[in-house]
Image (spheres, rainbow, N blue to C red):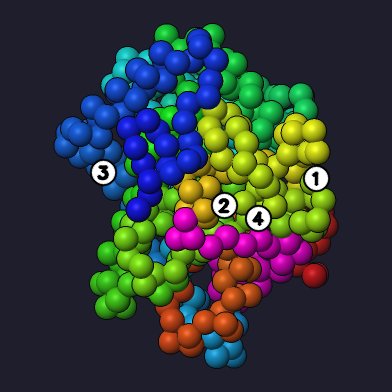
Amino acid sequence: MNGHSSRGYFGEFGGRFVPEVLVEPLRALETAMDDAFGDPAFWEEYRLVLRDYVGRPTPLTALRNLDAESSGPRLVLKREDCNHTGAHKILNALGQGLLAKRMNKVRLIAETGAGQHGVATATAGALLRLPVEVYMGSADMERQALNVYLMRLLGATVKAVDAGARTLKDATNEAFRDYAATAEHTAYVVGSAVGAHPYPTLVRGFARTIGDEARAQCLEQFGRLPEHVVACVGGGSNAIGAFAAFLEDQQVGLWGVEAGGVGLDRIGDHAASLSAGSIGVLHGARTFVLMDEEGQIGATHSVSAGLDYPGVGPEHAHLKSSGRVRYGAVSDDEALDAFCDLARAEGIVPALESAHAIAFSRKIRQKLDPEALVLVICSGRGDKDVARLALGAPALR
């Protein structure tokens, strides 16, 4: 169903479009991934650290108060905000960290937008005793100052990137440059299901813990699978991790939610590459990309730093093209409303990224069967966003 092949393609999307200097390091990573993924001892070590350090499995929470007067279907959150470090990113960071140790790497690097992946990688580095350097756009450092502090507290070096729009794309560019120069002893912990092969497959392998857990929990708690699964999509790791467990269940509708920003009509006003982009190559993979009229990577905008990226993971591009997953967009204002409403109604403060998925679920619920069970992935908690939003008094919206 996912279209994966040994060449690293999902249908027509994916591949390894990289400078020659990165070809051998990526081949070595692919070999190490295949070896580790086929080793039960590796997965046992991974499962134990998730249980005893991260605190998994994360719970399901039925939203009993949000839109209680609505006749629409029941919304249930998969609570990735309950992870140690506050988001799903720790799944991938620890998995890649363990793989780095297995490959005898002595240094970790990462890119980050919202800062959650940076915090998760810094955490993994502290636990595994590996030094960490994190590349972060200076614009994102300003709007995610709490996570910058946390990364430094955990012992990581945060490197400001002032190029371009000073956001996630630019941080990723710098991290790849570092990796090209230091791959012999460095592991690049990519933060989403993006980039050249084998990264989309590698990240998916760890992130699918979300979907595997949620599938088993729905069967145990509700006696059935959800009729719909909804997740936000920037690069797309939490979404592909959730969807992976349900791809073969054709009766389960899958929905990905992008950042609609302030409107989809103009490049620079949003970050919805699947909804408004075109096919191109970004960071080593063929996928949907936001480009200007001259074919240059376009500017993006989102109230959520973690969705502020001009491309998307190649498996999402394939799932859109195949029709297996439907993708939509949510505006900044709709996400902020969901952010505030969930906090007031349920006592749960979601990440702004997750608020996009919650807002979209509320938008479509009246069109769905009232008896449907809708599983919404709460990819992280909103502590990182509160200080910045408080300046605009969103609670008064």
Instruction: Give the left or right position of residue 370, taking residue 299 as reference.
Output: left
* Residue at mark 4 to residue at mark 1: CA–CA distance: 14 Å
- The residue tagged 2 is 233
Q: Is residue 381 visible?
A: no
- The residue tagged 3 is 47
Image quadrant in which you'd find residue 163:
top right
- The residue tagged 4 is 275
Dot placed on the residue nearer the N-terminal end, 1 or 3:
3
Q: Are marks 4 and 1 in contact (CB under 8 Å)?
A: no
Residue 125, how many percent across, how many down? Answer: 43, 26
> Which residue range is magenta in the image?
322-348
Residue that lies at the very extreme toward the front in this rendered image: 12
SS of the residue under disc 4 = helix
Residue lying at 48% horizontally and 41% vertically, measured from the top left: 12
Mark 3 burial class by Cα count in 10 Å: few <14, some 14-19, many 20+: some
Residue lying at 27% horizontally and 78% vertically, measured from the top left: 223
Which kind of residue does numbered mark 3 sit on? Arg
